[in-house]
Image (cartoon, grey):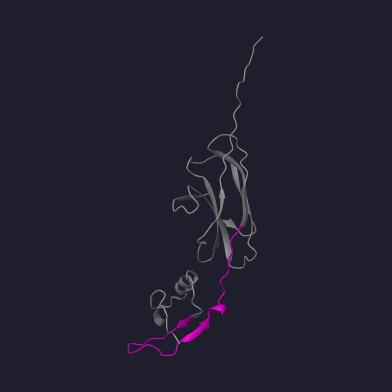
Amino acid sequence: VGGGRSQLGPEFNVSDNRSEEITQFAEQITVGSFTHVLVYARSSIQEQTTPEALAYSSISDASSAVQSVTFFDKDLEPLFLAGHITWQPPTDVSQLEHYIVYLAETPYASTRSQFGVDISLGTNFVLVPDNTPILPTQTQILVYARSSFFEQTTPVIEALSDASAYAKFVTFIDK
């Protein structure tokens, strides 16, 4: 038991009472090809030889991404938006608390701007008020789901289409 193992994160002292930190750490583990989680006790003398084992199949690894993000710009001025950003909720929302909407330059931009506030579960849209300014480089809408611990690492992406229309060749003849 434990051959080919890999330690994930720091050791935790029993007296630290850091159960929330341990839970948050566990939520960010990339499973890869591992099939079990092993927990070893360690004293100042030696490590436990037979760990407590948990098959990974008994650990919940839920995916809670929104679906079908849409936006239709109703403001016809360039670099201004209006309308609703909408999405379909994930099938399983049991671990979610909020949705977060960002405007960004690229689909996985580290520089992004949150649009509005965190959106509560049960609300599957965000209102974009008339004449909402955007930067010329903001070309993506990113929608993330958030649990009580973390924001989803991979967003659902929709290309931002900034509609614009101009009246041309307008004439007025005063009589």
Residue 125 in sight in this render? no
Q: Residue 114 or 40: which is nearer the viewer?
A: 40
Task: State the image coordinates of residue 144 (x, y, percent, origin top left).
Answer: 54, 57
Residue at 41% x, 82% y is 14
Q: Check the image and name the residue furthest to the right.
A: 175
Task: State the image coordinates of residue 142 (x, y, percent, origin top left).
Answer: 54, 52
Q: Check the image and name the residue furthest to the top.
A: 175
Residue 83 in sight in this render? yes
151 drawn magenta = no
Residue at 52% x, 83% y is 54
19 shown above or below 78: below
Q: Residue 58 or 119: which is nearer the viewer?
A: 58
Quadrant in which the C terminus is drawn: top right
**Numbered marks: total:** 0
Quadrant in which the N terminus is drawn: bottom left
Q: Which residues are magenta?
A: 37-66
43 shown above or below 81: below
Task: State the image coordinates of residue 32 (x, y, percent, origin top left).
Answer: 49, 72
Query: Most prominent secondary structure in the magenta stretch?
Result: loop
63 drawn magenta = yes
Task: State the image coordinates of residue 94 (x, y, percent, origin top left).
Answer: 62, 68
92 shown above or below 57: above
Residue at 54% x, 35% y is 78
Q: Left or right: 72 with respect to 29?
A: right
Q: Residue 48 or 120: which is nearer the viewer?
A: 48
